[in-house]
Amino acid sequence: MARAIKTVAIAGGGITAWSAAAALKRRIRALEVVVISSAPPPDALTDRISNTLPSIAEFHSDIGLSDEDTIVHAGSSIRAGTTFRGWAAGLPDYTHAYGAYGVPVGGVPFHQLWLRDYHSRGQPFDSFSPVAVRGSQVGHGLRLSIPTYRQLMHDYSLHLGVAERGGQIADVGIRGSDGFIEALVLEGGQRVEADLFIDCTGPAARVRSSVGGPFEQWNRWLLCDRVIIGAGEAYPESPLLDEVIATEAGWDWLSPGRSATEAGSVFSSAHRAESGGATFIRQGRLAEPWLRNCVAIGDAAVMVEPLEWTNLHLAHSQIDRLVAMMPDAQIAPIEVAEYNRQCNAEADRIRDFLCMHYLTARRGEPFWRDAAAVEPPPSLAHSLSLFSERGRLPYYEEETFARDSWLAVLFGHGFRPRRIDPLADAVPPEQVERALASHMGQPGDRFSSGQPSYRGSFLQMGQNAQ
Amino acid sequence: MAVVAVGKPAEICVSAFCFGKRDVREQPRLNVVVVGGGTAGWMTAAALGKLLPTRCNVTLVESEAIGIVGVGEATLPHIRGFNDRLGIDEAEFMAATRATFKLGIEFQDWARLGDSYIHPFGTFGSGQGDVPFHQYWCRLRKEGATMSALGDYSMAVTMANMNRFARPDPDPARIESTFNYAYQFDATLFAPFLRGIAETLGASRIEGRIVNVELDGESGDIAALQLEDGRRIEGDLFVDCSGFVSLLMGKALGEPFEDWSHWLPCDRAVAMPCRTETAVTPYTSAIAMPAGWRWRIPLQHRTGNGYVYSSSFISDDDARSALVGAVEGDGIAEPRVLRFKAGRRTRSWVRNCVAVGLSSGFLEPLESTSIYLIQAAISGLVELFPEKVISPVDRNEFNRLIDMEYDRIRDFLILHYHATERADAPFWDYVRTMSVPDTLQEKLELFRRRGRVVKYREGVFLDASWVAVYIGQRVIPEGHDIRADLPPLDVLARSAETLRADISAKAALMSDHRSHIEAYCPMAVAA
């Protein structure tokens, strides 16, 4: 058996790199971790998008950070989901909140009972969402204040014993015998050697690209290729929900944070004239995020638009997997293959989830017609065909979004199965009412706080976008 | 509105109906005809009657002249979920089927003669924390610490070794929560027990022998069954529970059989129950034999035995004498020989016919999966229960799910044979040196490397089961998880020892398996 991996060099200076550094150092203490830090480029969405999914809490607790550190001191705010506006013409806006919608009754999933008993009475599915019903368990992610959070991860990493080296990478030294990376050569000529190299430099994948291997584009399925990110005033009473508003050729978002507000646009340059200032994104993933002794994490591995805020989630998940599967210095291909299999399955399923948003959205503009006409990847086609038949969604390995997340969007777009599952017959409507009343308060009893409309302020901020 | 074609255009056209009008017509009940009154048949009839009372009328056709196989006496914990959904009272069920509790399966002589390990329905260690317990165990062993067998750090294994039983503690923080259990029962009594339930739920039973299966000339669907006495039984959906003969799926519809006997060469079993002379163990035993293996399943009133063998390596007569010579007590029935072939039908749902149980395929009972596979097919059928015009979407999904179950169990079974050092008999030479499916080869290499178990969230056997069998079969990882190096060796050794002692002390406080049964679910004394 080869010796253990001892040294790890991480390239990148955004929250992805520092999160990887903190997690590796904290969870595998024997490692020597060095970060070759430089400012993240504009297209590194994982380093720039402030919205995160509920999984971030577990990442923090695994590396020993408390809510006090990551929320109170880092200026984050709590978010419980997203309101989608204008995605389906003629239908109301809808909320995708994290957590369970309704309760299963008699072994029958709630959405089947909703289809039967509540849909026809005009009660939308999201009136049973965890943010709409008192007493339900609300899953929550964070809206990060990026500069503060980056500082936190940086300081925490150094506190744990991670070393930092500033400087641009001038060259990547490859060993002739086996194609492994030997060292990163910095502009001043210094060499940084390591057993394992982690690339968190964003889509350009400064280090990983020198090892080679194909990139699989997703532009057949996800048509957007431009992002604009802007900033605006803080919302001290930061609301629980963010907004994602369909536009002529894509969508805009508004993420009203307690320390700052982030807003932005995502669109297809083929469907909308560019006004300048937009960043190009090429959606897709590396066929092998890990090759030899180099692992791409974050945008270097998977580039995906921020719809549903999966960017940092993917990075965290890759980091977790790397920690759990850390090989020895020989880095056997069989172990790398298993890592890649899991990462790819996860990324592809997120691609499916996002593609589903466009396929089932209903708007008349050319962009939306084109986006709805794409032929979905086979795994998504399978999900949609099963769903269309009887509201069943097949389970896939490495699935990020729970069934109710899929349902919130599908039902929000008015996409419903042809029939109700016959299993629902065994549960009388009175039993459903009773179950809802006892578990969750009154059905449809919305929080009264009401969501303010951000539309006006958003437009203002859009003008200030870089 | 744009029409979105998903998959094959003929199969589905998303927008056309999904955004359009709901199909709100009252669905007519389907006439479901279940063929065969064994375990599979009555489980199906009872489940359909209970879970889909408004969607189907169930008729079960069976012939008393045809016996049932009924050797699937040992089960997996999943059966508890099945019984719960049917509202079955556990004590009543156990008394009726003369059942005992089962905490796992003991394997004797598999990797080497003299070896023994238990595959428990439970985890190793306390089941908490980032790093699986077996990683620490591997490190400690490698670094020279004196370690007990991996099973001594498992609650279920320790209870099994001490012949104890208690229900799992609901508090996940306690070590007594880290196991599950199943039953060992008399399968010939389970079918009649379920028949009572199914008939109460409205299933009707027809006694008769099927002489012809009538196919619709146009569609090729099954139209009706003709019985010996001239009766004709029509149906919308036919469930083939006819066992090995596969009357509908194999014979009438001609669905091909994928033969796996090059990987699983056992093709016969000779079975003979005997009096119990030793302990009523809360586990099933699988004892390796020169040309296969032998099961021992202790019930309340007797012990089931059988020798599963490959006819290429031993004759029926020799297998029979080997079994009679090996069992612990006097036989209470003549040994009888069963023939089978490992593999499955290419599809389990074809046209309007669903195969449940042995009619859909066979995997030897080494890991007690027969009833589990019946259950998987029934859940699939219930969840994908069709309308009068059967949608290919439902059918394909059912077949995908069943294939996955079969394939994963297949790999797990092959592992037991292939990962052996035995070279004392031609049978063991064959299985040790045969080539195995790529899916299994990868799993094996990954475990050998660093003790990693290929991760599935779905599928019957989870991580701990694979770990138990790998280690039990002497597939010892060369390396281990780097995180297992973190605690100092002596601290780790001390905590492992504390854990072992704690488990052992907790198990010692539990009641003896036999007394637990006598207090809880004694069988009725025969009149």
Image (cartoon, coloured by chain):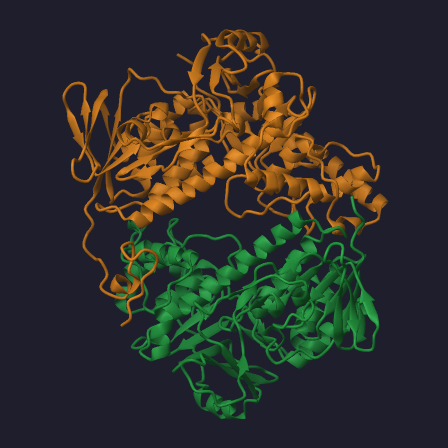
Chain colours: A green, B orange
Q: Residue at x 58, y 26 (%)?
A: B282
Estimate the x, y position of residue B157 in percent, counting from the top left.
65, 32
Whether residue B339 is situated above or below residue A124 in the rendered picture:
above
B161 vs A183, nearest the viewer: A183
Classify A420 as above or below A371: above
Q: Left or right of B524: which side holds B226? A: left
**In screen coordinates, is A203 left or right of A397?**
right
**Quarter occupied by the C terminus of chain A:** bottom right
The reply, left or right, for residue B288 in relation to residue B494 is left
Left or right of A403? Residue A341 is right
Judge whether residue B128 can be spotted in this image. Answer: no
Pick the residue in front: B169 or A161.
Answer: A161
Q: Where is residue B429 shown, x and y percent of the image?
A: 62, 21
Give residue A416's position: percent from left, percent from top. Answer: 31, 62
Where residue B58 sits in the image (x, y, percent)? 25, 35
Q: Quadrant of residue A94?
A: bottom left
Is any atom of residue A296 visible in this view? yes
